[in-house]
Amino acid sequence: MSEWFWVLWCILGAILIVAEIFTTGFVLFWFGIGALAAAFAGFIGIDSLAIQFAIFAIVSMALTAASRTIFVNYFSH
């Protein structure tokens, strides 16, 4: 089953990116990208779900924090 986790991550990523269309927060997109990063990790052979989840969490949080910083700086002027 672990060799198919990347497919589940791809599905989750697609759902989150499509769900972003219906929201105004611009947050789900970054979690979708994080899920796709975890899918890529699974695709290249990282079979540990814990490592895939860690990649998902780190990428999602980093992109969310970076985008918030950029948006705050951009819209504060």
Image (cartoon, rainbow, N blue to C red):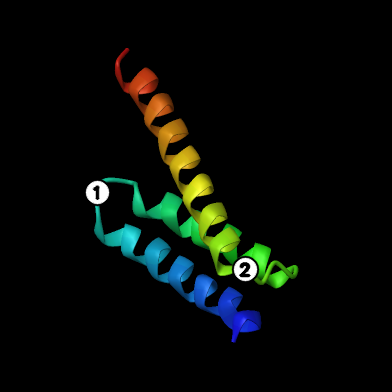
**The disc label shown at residue 48, or none:** 2
The percent position of residue 53, horizontal first and vertical second, equals 51, 60
Q: Residue at x 26, y 61 (%)?
A: 22
Image quarter where the N terminus lies is bottom right
The percent position of residue 67, horizontal first and vertical second, equals 43, 34
Q: Is residue 6 left or right of residue 43?
A: left
**Farthest residue in the bottom direction?**
1
Mark with earlier residue (1, 2): 1
Q: Which residue is mark 1?
A: 24
The percent position of residue 65, horizontal first and vertical second, equals 42, 34
Q: CA distance from mark 1 to mark 2?
A: 34 Å
**Picture quadrant of residue 73:** top left
Mark 1–mark 2 CB contact (< 8 Å): no
Q: Which one is in front in this view, the residue at disc 1 or the one at disc 2?
A: 2
Q: Residue at x 51, y 46 (%)?
A: 58
Image quarter where the C terminus lies is top left
Q: Is residue 53 left or right of residue 26?
A: right
Q: Residue at x 44, y 50 (%)?
A: 30
- 5 relative to 75, above or below: below
**Farthest residue in the top direction?**
77
Tag 1 secondary structure: loop
The percent position of residue 6, horizontal first and vertical second, equals 60, 74
The three-letter amino acid code for the residue at tag 1 is Thr
